[in-house]
Image (cartoon, helix red, strand yellow):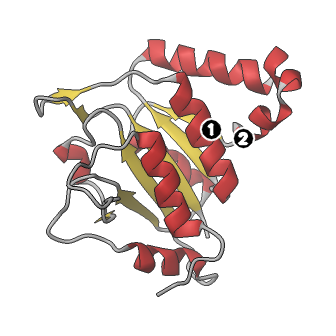
């Protein structure tokens, strides 16, 4: 299994449905890194085009990987060891193609919205469990009100949404990522 997660801050959708860029938050950096480490993902990509956000993320990563934070909280350092910054998904694709030459990269978007066709958890779970499947999977999460349609069009699949027992569905990206990773990689889950 090779699985990366990407948290996209642009292009996303705002409340009105317009294209937007969202800010990277400290919670996103730490919580998605920790979730990725817990479930054994091979990388966590923070995707944002603006240099000030890159400087902020690099400052946070330096503090916990190399600075005072690395000795204060070694488990935080460990959770951040596969966390990377990229300008856009094109950069992520290029870096993955370099890291995994000749292997197919499969892009799987997440969304709280239902689509006409979606990839079921059990199918992706089977793919990830198959030791002979050498594809590189990238699970793509959008911030704000989700990935912009132009980004969704570039995806190979859209994973079925996380739904609770009510008709209200607006989880934080951190909560949704944790649930999705557990559904795909959690111990003790049957592959149906």
Asked if residue 15 shows in the view, the reply is: yes
Q: Which label was assigned to residue 56?
A: none
Q: Which residue is mark 1?
A: 83
Label 2, secondary structure: give it: helix
In the rendered image, the vertical position of residue 41 relative to residue 49, given as above or below: below
Spot occupied by residue 130 in the image (x, y as percentages of width and height): 58, 82
Label 2 CA crowd tier, 10 Å (few <14, some 14–19, many 20+): many
Between 150 and 36, the residue placed more toward the observer is 36
Counting every numbered tag in the picture gives: 2
Label 1, secondary structure: give it: strand
Q: Residue at x 33, y 24 (%)?
A: 22
Spot occupied by residue 132 in the image (x, y as percentages of width and height): 61, 84
Spot occupied by residue 184 in the image (x, y as percentages of width and height): 52, 68
Asked if residue 97 shows in the view, the reply is: no
Quadrant the N terminus occupies: bottom right
Q: Residue at x 64, y 15 (%)?
A: 59
Instruction: Say left or right for 113 vs 47.
Output: left
Q: Residue at x 55, y 15 (%)?
A: 56
Q: Which residue is mark 2?
A: 79
Instruction: Say left or right for 160 vs 65.
Output: left
Q: Quadrant of residue 173?
A: top left
Between 9 and 189, the residue placed more toward the observer is 189
Spot occupied by residue 83 in the image (x, y as percentages of width and height): 62, 38
* Contact check, label 2 and label 1, Cβ < 8 Å: yes
Q: Quadrant of residue 128?
A: bottom right
Q: Residue at x 26, y 54 (%)?
A: 154
Residue most extreme to the right: 71
In the rendered image, the vertical position of residue 125 relative to residue 167, given as above or below: below
In the rendered image, the vertical position of residue 190 relative to residue 86, given as above or below: below
Measure the alpha-carbon separation of dots 2 and 1: 8 Å
In the rendered image, the vertical position of residue 160 relative to residue 67, given as above or below: below
Residue most extreme to the bottom: 192
């Amino acid at each position: 299994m090779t699985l990366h997660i990407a948290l996209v801050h642009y292009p996303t959708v705002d409340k009105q449905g317009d294209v937007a860029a969202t800010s990277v938050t400290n919670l996103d950096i730490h919580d998605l890194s920790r979730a990725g480490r817990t479930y054994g993902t091979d990388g966590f990509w923070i995707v944002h085009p603006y240099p000030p956000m890159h400087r902020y993320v690099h400052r946070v990563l330096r503090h916990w990987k190399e600075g005072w934070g690395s000795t204060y909280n070694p488990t935080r350092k460990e959770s951040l060891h596969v966390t990377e910054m990229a300008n856009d998904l094109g950069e992520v694709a290029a870096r993955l193609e370099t890291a995994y030459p000749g292997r197919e990269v499969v892009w799987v978007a997440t969304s709280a919205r239902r689509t006409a066709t979606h990839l079921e958890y059990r199918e992706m779970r089977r793919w990830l469990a198959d030791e002979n499947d050498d594809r590189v999977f990238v699970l793509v999460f959008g911030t704000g009100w989700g990935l912009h349609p132009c980004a969704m069009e570039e995806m190979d699949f859209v994973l079925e949404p996380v739904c609770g027992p009510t008709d209200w569905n607006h989880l934080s990206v951190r909560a949704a990522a944790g649930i999705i990773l557990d559904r795909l990689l959690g111990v003790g889950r049957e592959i149906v």
